Image (tube, rainbow, N blue to C red):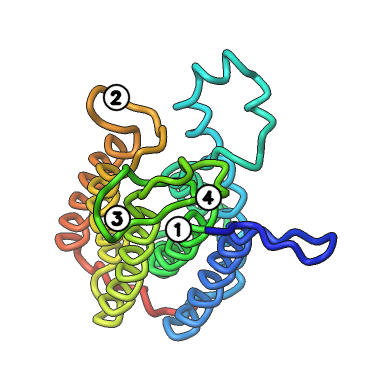
C-alpha cells in the first residue's frame, strides 16, 4: 500500500487528501441538509471551524494523555504534529467547541448536533481510508485471505498479513452515515439522531478495537477507546430515552433561525 505520491518535487500524502475530502464532504452534506431543515448555514460554518480547531486540540490532548510515559522519555513527541491523533479526542473536542459556539450565538445546540453528526460519520469513513493508505490504526496478524500487507508503511509492520481494520471501520462509518440520514428524514425528536450516533459508533468502535494491534493506551484489559466507548454508549442510551420523554422534543427543529 502506498501513501505518498511523488510528482516531481511535490509529495502528495493520501492520508491528508482523504482527511481533507472528509472535512469538505461533511461541510457540504451538512450545508445541504441545513437548507432543507431551515437551519442557518452561517451558524453551521462557525460550528465547522470551531469543531476543526477544537477537534484537533482534543485529538492531541487525548493522545498526550495516553502517551505520557513515552513523552516523559522523549519530550520531542509534543512537537510532532504529523503523528499522534486520536479520533475520540477529536470528536469530544469538536462537540465541546461546537457547544460553546452555539451558546455564544444563542442557538439550539442539539438541532445542529443532529444535523452534523451524520456528516461527521461520513467524514470519519474518509479518514479511515486515509489510515488504510498510511498504515496507521492497523489490525492484528491474520491467516485470513481477507488481509492486507504493507511494504512501505512507517506505522504498520511490513510484510505480514494484517486484519484490514481501517476498511472495516470505513464501511461501518459510511453505513452509519447513511442510516442516520435516513433516520433523520423521519423527523425524530430532537437529540435522537445524536443519541443514535453515540450508540452506533461506540458499539462499532468497541468491537473494532478487538481487532486492532497498534498501541492506543490501556486500562486493565480495555483499550482507552473501549473504555470511552462504554461511557459514550451510556450517554447515547440516556440521550435517546431523555429525548423520547422530553415534551415537545421536535418543537423548533424546523424553524428558521
Q: Earlier in the sequence, mark 2 or mark 3?
A: 3
Comparing labels 2 and 4, the label whose residue is closer to the camera: 4
Q: For this rendering, which residue is in front, 171 or 109?
A: 171
Secondary structure found at label 1: helix
Secondary structure found at label 3: helix
Name the residue located 23 percent from the left edge and 40 percent from the top edge: 230
Secondary structure found at label 2: strand
Left or right, 177 with respect to 5, comes to left
Tell me the distance, in whole angstroms, between the alpha carbons under discs 1 and 3: 14 Å
Tell me the distance, in whole angstroms, between the alpha carbons under discs 1 and 2: 24 Å
Q: Earlier in the sequence, mark 1 or mark 2?
A: 1
- Residue 150 x %, y %: 48, 51
Q: For this rendering, which residue is in front, 189 or 116?
A: 116
Q: Earlier in the sequence, mark 4 or mark 1?
A: 1
Of the numbered discs in the image, which one, if any, rests on residue 201?
3
Q: Earlier in the sequence, mark 2 or mark 4?
A: 4
Q: Earlier in the sequence, mark 4 or mark 3?
A: 4
Question: Mark 1 — residue?
Answer: 128
Name the residue located 25 percent from the left edge and 54 percent from the top edge: 204
Question: Mark 4 — residue?
Answer: 151
How many badges with numbers are in the image? 4
Comparing labels 4 and 3, the label whose residue is closer to the camera: 4
Left or right, 126 with respect to 198, comes to right
- Badge 2 density bin: few <14, some 14–19, many ≥20, Cα 10 Å: few
Name the residue located 25 percent from the left edge and 22 percent from the top edge: 220
Question: Mark 2 — residue?
Answer: 219
Amino acid at each position: 500500500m502506498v501513501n505518498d505520491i511523488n510528482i516531481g518535487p511535490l509529495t502528495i500524502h493520501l492520508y491528508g487528501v482523504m482527511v481533507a475530502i472528509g472535512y469538505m464532504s461533511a461541510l457540504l452534506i451538512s450545508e445541504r441538509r441545513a437548507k432543507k431543515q431551515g437551519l442557518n448555514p452561517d451558524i453551521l460554518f462557525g460550528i465547522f471551524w470551531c469543531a476543526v480547531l477544537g477537534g484537533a486540540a482534543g485529538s492531541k490532548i487525548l493522545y498526550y494523555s495516553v502517551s505520557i510515559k513515552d513523552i516523559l522519555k522523549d519530550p520531542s513527541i509534543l512537537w510532532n504534529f504529523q503523528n499522534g491523533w486520536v479520533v475520540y479526542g477529536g470528536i469530544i473536542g469538536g462537540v465541546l467547541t461546537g457547544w460553546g459556539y452555539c451558546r455564544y450565538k444563542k442557538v439550539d445546540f442539539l438541532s445542529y448536533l443532529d444535523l452534523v453528526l451524520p456528516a461527521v460519520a461520513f467524514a470519519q469513513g474518509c479518514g479511515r481510508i486515509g489510515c488504510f493508505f498510511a498504515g496507521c490504526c492497523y489490525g492484528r496478524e491474520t491467516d485470513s485471505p481477507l488481509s492486507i500487507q504493507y511494504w512501505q508503511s512507517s506505522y504498520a509492520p511490513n510484510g505480514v498479513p494484517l486484519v484490514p481494520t481501517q476498511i472495516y471501520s470505513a464501511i461501518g462509518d459510511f453505513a452509519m452515515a447513511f442510516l442516520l440520514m435516513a433516520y433523520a428524514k423521519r423527523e425524530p425528536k430532537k437529540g435522537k439522531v445524536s443519541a443514535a450516533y453515540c450508540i452506533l459508533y461506540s458499539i462499532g468502535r468497541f468491537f473494532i478495537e478487538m481487532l486492532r494491534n497498534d498501541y492506543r493506551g490501556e486500562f486493565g484489559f480495555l483499550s482507552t477507546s473501549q473504555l470511552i466507548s462504554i461511557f459514550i454508549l451510556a450517554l447515547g442510551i440516556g440521550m435517546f430515552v431523555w429525548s423520547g420523554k422530553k415534551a415537545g422534543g421536535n418543537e423548533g427543529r424546523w424553524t428558521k433561525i
